Image (cartoon, grey):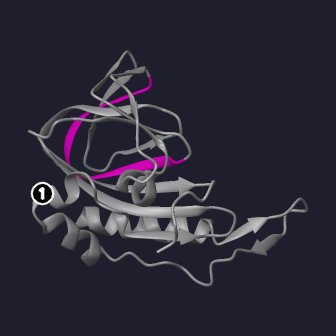
Amino acid sequence: MRAMQSVVAFLFVFSTATSGIGDAQGTTVPSEAVSAIDVSAAEIQSILTRAPQATLNGQPNIRVADVGGYNVAIGVLHRPEKAVGVAAQHFKVTEVYHIIDGAGTLVTGGTMVNAKMRPPDSLAVTQEDGPGASGTAIEGGKSRRIKAGDVVIIPAGVPHWFSNIEGSISYLVVRVDPSRVLAPK
């Protein structure tokens, strides 16, 4: 429950921080977003309690909001230990992972093995994280163990991959989309 409270607090602070855009004189210009966008702990928990396959891959974002000048998406994923890891690289979307439960080894940077462009009409491109590539692993890069409570920022263009999952891992993902490749919902 404490993790869910942290997630809700993070979303509140993030949405407050992006509610306006400063101009050259430092004044705040209202964004196109009419009000804050809510994603409740109950919605997140509902997704996480579904069958593991529902949040493993192919899960559209919970929300995609136009926050004035760019879009921000919120999603949640659960990866079981036995899941086949897919390396990913998103060309236009930055991701922020907040680990809710579990632990694993995340590799970032390096070179993707067997990289293939994602089809432009695929669910991953149109509803999750925009244009990019997928691969079977990463050579080189930086490996780090992440666990509940940790936050990792993965800039657009950086390959990333879970090389190991300890039991399972669940995480909230915030996707910053300056190119607006994800449609608001």
Q: Position of residue 45 (x, y in %)?
A: 21, 70
**Rendered view: 174 above or below 64:** above
Q: Residue at x 63, y 54 (%)?
A: 179
Instruction: Spot the residue most to the top.
Output: 140
Q: Residues within 10 Å of mark 1 (few under 14, many from 20)?
A: some
Instruction: Spot the residue most to the right.
Output: 25
Frontmost residue, 149 versus 173:
173
Label 1 secondary element: helix
Q: Amino acid at mark 1?
A: Pro
Label tally: 1
Q: In this rendering, would 98 be left or right of 147? A: right
Specify the principal SS of the magenta part. Answer: strand
* Residue tagged 1: 52
Magenta-drawn segment: 93-109
Instruction: Spot the residue most to the bottom.
Output: 34
- Residue 48 sits in quarter: bottom left
Q: Position of residue 98 (x, y in %)?
A: 36, 52
Q: Position of residue 61 (x, y in %)?
A: 38, 64
- Residue 75 sits in quarter: bottom left
